[in-house]
Amino acid sequence: MIKWVAAIIGYSVFRFPGAILGFLIGRFVEFLAKGSIQIKTNSYAIRPEAFQLNLLALSALIIKADGKIERKELEFVRSFFIGQFGKAKADSIFKTFNTQIKNETQHLDQLTGVFVQQTPYETRLQILHFLFGIANADGRVSEIELTKLSEIASGMRLRLPDFESIKAMFIKNTDNAYKILEISPGADVDQIKTAYRKMVKKYHPDKLRGQDPAMIKGAEEKFREVQKAYEAIMDKKNS
């Protein structure tokens, strides 16, 4: 039950990335009493506390990436953790981080290695979504932040097309519309229409009928992105 509540809260605040990450974290909360939760990887297990603290450590790397700490980025992280765990638990997580981890040197390869070894690929994608959300909390993703996000994605062994797809959702331009439709900027009108029909068929929410609500919400979000991309490209072609 908790995982669904967390997914709904995450979606309401941070849309699809929040829904999926909220669902995953909600699962961890349900198993807190057991001390660990099994993740769908090669028999690895990750404790909820370890997941939370490592996620917070990665968040700190993004917040400090450009040498200045933005209040909006801090509020983004805090709001997310409170939304998933409640204020008391979130405060406990932050206290543990501040007293035990904050002043230690954080090695990116070690942090990302934990997620590579102990979480599935899909979870790592949603973590990257979340980190992009932090970087974009002040209205833009800086070049320094983008470089750090790229390093984290590489460390988590995420494929470049997946990184570019997530990046396109936060950094908007016409080329990103082409990336969403998976065509080149040189595509003609017929190719654009063919690509659009293909993507509509691929991402239509009806294909996920009966599946997890968070996944359906995500499909709806992606479907809207496909429509917006098509409209942006066609508007430019017709101008």
Image (cartoon, rainbow, N blue to C red):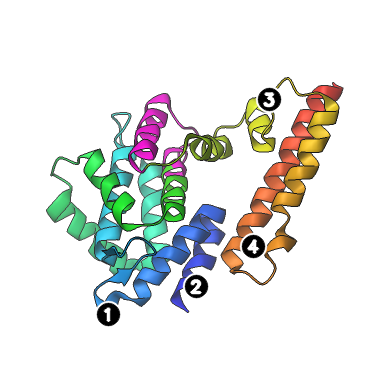
* Quadrant in the rendering for residue 211: bottom right
For the residues labelled 3 and 1, the Cα–Cα distance comes to 51 Å
Element class at badge 2? helix
Seen in the picture, residue 177 relative to 91 is either above or below; the reply is above
Magenta segment range? 132-156
The residue at 47%/68% (across/down) is: 6
Please tell me the numbered disc located at residue 216.
4
Q: Earlier in the sequence, mark 3 or mark 2?
A: 2
Q: Earlier in the sequence, mark 4 or mark 1?
A: 1
Seen in the picture, residue 71 relative to 51 is either above or below; the reply is above
For the residues labelled 2 and 1, the Cα–Cα distance comes to 18 Å
Check disc 2 and report the residue beneath it. Answer: 5
The residue at 47%/66% (across/down) is: 23
Element class at badge 4? helix
Badge nearest the viewer, 3 or 1: 3
For the residues labelled 4 and 3, the Cα–Cα distance comes to 28 Å
Q: Earlier in the sequence, mark 3 or mark 1?
A: 1
For the residues labelled 4 and 1, the Cα–Cα distance comes to 30 Å
Element class at badge 1? helix
Q: Earlier in the sequence, mark 2 or mark 1?
A: 2
Please tell me the numbered disc located at residue 184.
3
Tag 4 near tag 1, CB within 8 Å: no
Q: Is residue 179 left or right of residue 85?
A: right
User: Which of the two residues, 231 or 203, is positioned nearer the viewer here?
Assistant: 203
Badge nearest the viewer, 2 or 4: 4
The residue at 55%/32% (across/down) is: 171
